Image (tube, grey):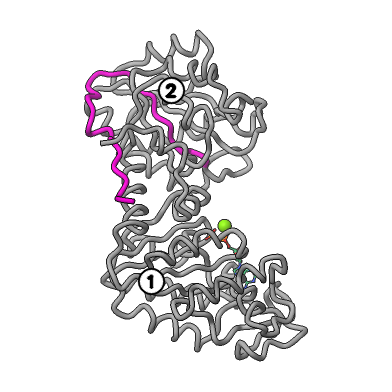
Amino acid sequence: MAIIQKKTVSDVDVREKRVLVRVDFNVPQDAQGRPTDDSRLVASLPTIKYLLEKKARVVLMSHLGRPKGKPNPKYRMDPVAARLQELLGYPVTKLDGCVEDDVVTKARQAAERSVVLLENLRFYPNEEAGDPKFAAGLARHGELFVNDAFGAAHRAHASVSGVAQFLPAVAGLLMEKEITFLSKVLHAPEHPYVAILGGAKVSDKLGVIRNLAKSADKLLIGGAMAFTFLKAKGLGTGKSLVEEDRVDEVRQYLKDLGAKLVLPVDFVTAPSGDGNVRTRVVKAEEIPADEMGLDIGPASRELFAKALVGARMVVWNGPMGKFEISDFVAGTESVAQTIAGLKATTVVGGGDSVAALTKLDLVNRVTHVSTGGGASLEFLEGIELPGIKVLQNR
Ligand code: ADP
Ligand code: MG
């Protein structure tokens, strides 16, 4: 398969058009519903500004939280609209519905050089059900549909893929960037190419491991999922997190991937993962029965750093340990620092890996940080995402 080529806002005529844009404003909120992290709002600005410069009439739509198909004051879009207005520097008009006649009328009356934000899409059960009637209702807001919500692209929801049945559909600039880098990782990597996988559950990431193994030269495995690999090799894992029902499958991976696979050789262990407990460093063969592995150890940090020397391309998904607790952050920090120092195309995906990068203030030192957790995983597994599939090809 070649690099995926989709039309974007800059490939079509948007001048003075009414443009309906799906954005990902599913931001973390404080008790008053105000966003506590602006990164998703900031990431949407290039597309919105581009459209406003072309005098397009912009109608934005997003989901927020999990209101489960019912209006819920906690998840109204008003605080998001207020924050967006500050960041954007143009007026943002928040409307109290999505598809109702008066909402459509008000959206059309919006002033030039302003944008409209619809109410939370998930106040309607039809959104997640992918109801075509609801999608047609949304489509009344535009002459063109722009999908810039990469984080929602793996959902076949009305506002993600449904609307494209009624309007010409193209990618926004953020979506374009995601597709470009992630499809480069899969279909046009530069070698040597190293993939680093970690995180909590091996079952979440076996598909990614299998798919990346097709093109990567090395796969480094850390995080809790390393223990299912250890178990499959017949080693003791103490109280570490192991997915028993995946051990046989992982044993097959060990056979198939052979020398490409690099596993940790030591770990930081503790009696529990709570922090403020005595920790020790043990060899992979010597995890005590009453302790759990919570981070990769110093020898593994060195092993992984060496495996990354000279890499031209790196993809990283999943922390190396329970990084939220300072006793167990060293492995994740070491991988992050090593990647940040490379002269390579570096792509980082996954909610917690990106949180770790942010905490270490290294976001600007990697080539691309994927904004979608589930969406980037499914993309890396090789699944064609519904929200990308429906976009016009170049
Ligand atoms: P991402 O969001 O980057 O894809 P995951 O959601 O798969 O990552 O995994 C992140 C979680 O895994 C974190 O909460 C982290 O604490 C946990 N984790 C990583 N290694 C371990 C470990 N050895 N023991 C327990 N939890 C771990
Ligand atoms: Mg996660």
Q: Residue at x 32, y 45 (%)?
A: 4
* Left or right: where 231 falls relative to 106: right
Q: Residue 9: say if magenta.
A: yes
Q: Residue 346 appears in which quarter of the rendering?
A: bottom left
Q: Residue at x 41, y 19 (%)?
A: 166
Quarter of the image where ligand 1 sits:
bottom right
Q: Element under label 2?
A: helix
Q: Residue at x 63, y 81 (%)?
A: 233
**Residue 194 - label:** 1
**Residue on which disc 2 sits:** 165
* Left or right: where 271 falls relative to 251: right
- Three-letter code, disc 2: Gln
Residue 390 or residue 121, whichever sits in front: 390
Q: Is residue 267 above or below residue 92?
A: below
Marks 1/2: CA distance?
Answer: 39 Å
Of the 4 image quadrants, the one containing the C terminus is: top left
x then y, percent, for residue 158: 52, 27
Binning the other alpha carbons within 10 Å of mark 1 as few (below 14), some (14 to 19) or many (20 upward) gives: many
Residue 325 seen: no
Q: Residue 316: say if magenta.
A: no
Binning the other alpha carbons within 10 Å of mark 2 as few (below 14), some (14 to 19) or many (20 upward) gives: some
- Three-letter code, disc 1: Val
Looking at the rendering, the stretch of residues picked out in magenta corresponds to: 1-26
Q: Residue 139 appears in which quarter of the rendering?
A: top left
| Between discs 1 and 2, the one toward the N terminus | 2
Residue 302 or residue 378, whichever sits in front: 378
Q: Residue 147 appears in which quarter of the rendering?
A: top left
**Residue 227 - label:** none
x then y, percent, for residue 67: 65, 33
